[in-house]
Image: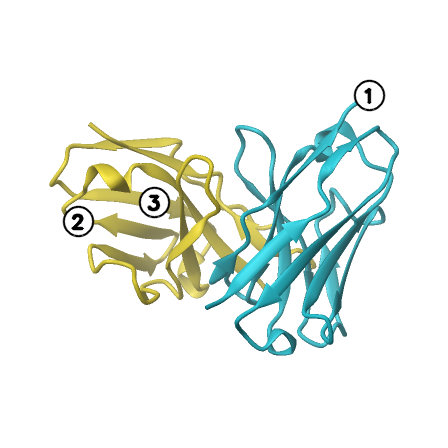
Amino acid sequence: QVQLVESGGGVVQPGGSLRLSCAASGFTFSGYGMHWVRQAPGKGLEWVAFVRSDGSSRCYADSVKGRFTISRDNSKYTLYLQMNSLRTEDTAVYYCAKGMYYFDSWGQGTLVTVSS
Amino acid sequence: SYVLTQPPSVSVAPGQTARITCGGNNIGSKSVHWYQQKPGQAPVLVVYDDSDRPSGIPERFSGSNSGSTATLTISRVEAGDEADYYCQVWDSTSDHHVVFGGGTKLTVL
């Protein structure tokens, strides 16, 4: 069965950096687009970034463009999110999600807290 | 950018039918997807491409989409259906592509 396991979350100061990983299993990772979606405490879902199955194309929400970078290593079945210049408003649970036009599987999420 | 509008809350008695709407400009021309999220859990896809159900999702969950409104319908509502529900589209006309609605809290009375 499909499994997505996020890691790398934690507490970081404003202006700091963090790298999230999402380990995938149970499906052919290289055949699917992948996304990062976040959810601030008590708030709704916010799409963050997308990468095509072969990594050839990426897009970002305006709120993270220029600060976050999505990437993938298909040989390792792993999705990444490099987060730089973190702000307090980036505090959220970050989910990786499988699919291109919709998300048929989600990880359990990893909490990122940006606080001084 | 494209905006999806959902009511913040919907309440329904057990056994009745819940309808959760998702409004957007000419949303009927897009494919709409719906997610259920229970407290402390990741979202789960319950309807995709307007009206299709993933395997394992009960037939009580159905969807429709026309004009400026998409609707998630939950028939014979159960206590276990109490959750937040989000609609989502892929907007090919923008760089951002993925748009979520603000979410609707379904309360089972």
The mark lying in front, picked from 2 and 3, is 2
The numbered mark at residue A55 is none
Which chain shows up in yellow? Answer: B
Residue A14 x %, y %: 84, 29
- Which shade of the palette goes to chain A? cyan
- Tell me the quarter of the image containing the C terminus of chain B: top left
Secondary structure of residue under mark 1: loop
Q: Tell me the kind of residue under disc 1.
A: Ser
Corner quadrant of residue A57: bottom right
The numbered mark at residue B21 is 3
Secondary structure of residue under mark 2: loop
The residue wearing badge 2 is B75
The residue wearing badge 1 is A116
Q: Tell me the kind of residue under disc 3.
A: Thr
| Crowding at mark 1 (Cα within 10 Å: few <14, some 14-19, many 20+) | few
Corner quadrant of residue B55: bottom left
Q: Nearer the viewer, residue A97 or A89?
A: A97
Protein chain holding label 3: B
- Residues indicated by labels 1 and 3 sit on the same polypeptide chain: no
Label 2, label 3: how many angstroms apart (C-alpha)? 15 Å
Protein chain holding label 2: B
Residue B69 x %, y %: 36, 51
